[in-house]
Image (cartoon, helix red, strand yellow):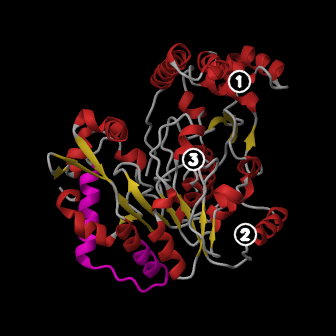
Amino acid sequence: MELKLRNTPYNFLYKRWKWRIKSAYNELNNILFGDEKGQNIKHIKNIIMRLLPIAHHLRKPYFPAYLLCLIVSFPVVLLVRVVRPIVHIRFGRIHSGFGQTVLIPEVYLSRRKVGFDEQNTVDIFFFEGDIKNQQLRKMICRKMFVNPLIQPFYNANLFLSGWKTHLVKSPSYYPEPDVEHSFLEVPPQLTFQNEELGQVKTELVKYGMKPGDKFVCLYVRDAGYKLNSSSFGICFDVNQFGRIIDKLIDVGYYVLRMGKNVEKPLTYSHTRVIDYGWKFQSDLMDIWLAANCEFFVNTGGGLTSVAVAFRRPLINFNFDVFTFWSTAKDSLVAFNRFKKDGKYLTLREIIAFGFNGILQLAMNTKQTGIQIEEQSEQEVIDMIDEMISRLNGSWKTSNDLMEMQDRFRSILKEWDDFHFWHGKKLLCKVGHNYMLQNQDWLLK
């Protein structure tokens, strides 16, 4: 399967600067009309960072070298084209968003290991922005050459003829998920060192656990996400999912509530329930726990990418139908329902409504007259039962259900951006009971 180009440099530059200007305008409004006057310095700083991205490098010790690279970038990139018969150099970008920081390196390394990518190239990368997890940074830099001085050459390459030949096939110009299913062919490429695993054992003791204990991660973004992130995200109160925790405990798992800078503690009390996000959060354990859980129960967010990258099964609930980790093997999903005038929107109507429109509905339900209906706890518990049966080998899939899954995929393929998010097959399946109970809108 040939990766499809999803962007051009000029189109991407237009979108990027449109976002920068809009973001700076919003910050200016916060200064002029906002109530929190003590935040004005922060807003001014954000405006400068949006409109003058080079300011990000000003206080860095490498800034003089960065300026020099900026000056010589175009001649050097032209030279890269000249020497290509001898050595083929490619430039790559690793975005600082948590999910992208995980998936871009893992997809790149896995594709290269399998042979889906060119082998005889020298690939050099840079981190765009500040990496949020330092453990992840270390794991990436052990496997790839990453240096901030690469950025000027990466940018220069995009404005010269032949740019695709010298660009690593990764976002923002190629798909972010593993749409070629290289994860099925090779184990995770990002790895832990023995010293780090020793630290993990020490941390587990603090939680009242020991190596070998089976655990499930529960990752529910709460209002702390809105306070600590500039990106849009739908948030929930983790304490509304007590029955889900009950179920996981009853079948013998430890349950670890995940998250960083969470808004409030988990009120559920049990010896096998660890409020990791509130009490123990660390960069190392964020990665190790998501990489080693039995399965990962989540409502979406960057940390889910770690479970995907390390081939852990997911239970996805309250998701949209567009971007639901379909490349995660052995995973299950259930979607938000959208109701208007007493009737659920069909899958085709949701597709027609548009990806961006659906994501913004949480803020505009009154204006559109569309209500969002989330999953019940019982629907999530049904998926947990199905997941456990699939993991222990007792699950049996009927031909009728397989036909329903195929029908769902065939309709979803009508979405214009399908191939940028999903591969030849959907490895993540719609939950069995959820499919049966929602086929009236999901298969139309």
Left or right of 111 on screen, residue 404: left
Question: Circle 3 is placed at which residue position?
Answer: 99
Foreground tag (2 vs 1): 2
> In the rendering, at what x and y percent does residue 47 appear?
60, 17
> In the rendering, at what x and y percent does residue 291 appear?
63, 63
Closer to us: 368 or 390? 368
* Type of amino acid at the residue the image marks with label 2: Tyr
Kindly state the secondary structure of the residue where label 2 is placed.
Answer: loop
* Type of amino acid at the residue the image marks with label 3: Gly
Left or right of 170 on screen, residue 136: right
The residue positioned 43% from the left and 52% from the top of the image is 1
Question: Circle 2 is placed at which residue position?
Answer: 207
Q: CA distance from mark 3 to mark 1?
A: 21 Å
Kindly state the secondary structure of the residue where label 3 is placed.
Answer: helix
Determine whether label 3 and label 2 are within 8 Å by CB: no
Task: Tell me which corner region of the image, top left, top right, bottom left or bottom right, holds residue 333.
Answer: bottom left
Question: Circle 1 is placed at which residue position?
Answer: 56
The residue positioned 78% from the left and 66% from the top of the image is 203
Q: Which residues are magenta?
A: 384-413
Closer to us: 364 or 404? 364
The residue positioned 77% from the left and 16% from the top of the image is 67
Mark 3 vs mark 2: which is more N-terminal? 3
